[in-house]
Image (cartoon, rainbow, N blue to C red):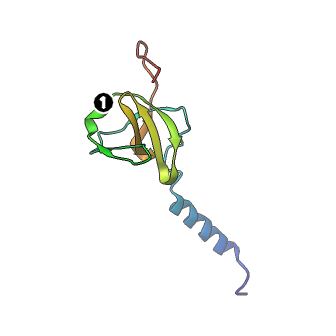
Amino acid sequence: MPGLATDEDSSNSSSISKEAGGSAAEPSLVVGDRVGLIEALPYLKTSDPMPMLRPPDLVDPEEIGQVVEIRALGTVAVKFRRGTFLIDAHQLTPRFPQEGQDSSL
């Protein structure tokens, strides 16, 4: 019948929604997590009400930042030593402060 969904239809739609969401591939981050950059970025975008593009050398590749806000479309606001920047979640990796490093941001 045209108005009823079959088991085959529902399994196809669930696999499509999983592929379209893409949330399984992105790391799940929460506010307060310590993170670092996976690779150097071409530029940094500030998390100000009027964001600006800044040079990438404001954040060292080894620097550990703290997630301060989760935004839409997989964007995360991360506080580093020289500012708070908007970064895609897939460009971040969880990090843990090494002994002797200052853990306060």
Residue 105 position, x and y percent, is 45, 24
Q: Which one is in front, 93 or 54?
A: 54
Left or right: where does residue 13 sit relative to residue 71? Answer: right
Left or right: where does residue 69 sit relative to residue 102? Answer: right
Residue 40 position, x and y percent, is 29, 39
Which amino acid type is marked by label 1? Asp
Which residue is denoted by mark 1 in the rendering?
A: 60
Q: Residue at x 44, y 37 (%)?
A: 78
Q: Residue at x 64, y 74 (%)?
A: 9
Q: Which one is in front, 19 or 91?
A: 91
**How many numbered marks, from 0 up?**
1
Q: Residue at x 32, y 33 (%)?
A: 59
Query: Where, by quadrant of the figure, is residue 102 drawn?
Result: top left
Q: Which one is in front, 77 or 29?
A: 77
Q: Residues within 10 Å of mark 1 (few under 14, many from 20)?
A: some
Q: Is residue 13 above or below residue 39?
A: below
Q: Which one is in front, 41 or 21?
A: 41
Q: Is residue 15 above or below residue 57?
A: below
Which residue appears farthest toward the front when viewing the image? 50
Query: Where, by quadrant of the figure, is residue 6 drawn?
Result: bottom right
Residue 18 position, x and y percent, is 56, 60
Which residue appears farthest toward the top when viewing the image? 100
The secondary structure type at the circle numbered 1 is loop
Left or right: where does residue 27 sit relative to residue 53? Answer: right
In the rendered view of the protein, which quadrant contains the N terminus?
A: bottom right
Q: Residue at x 31, y 39 (%)?
A: 39
Residue 17 position, x and y percent, is 57, 64
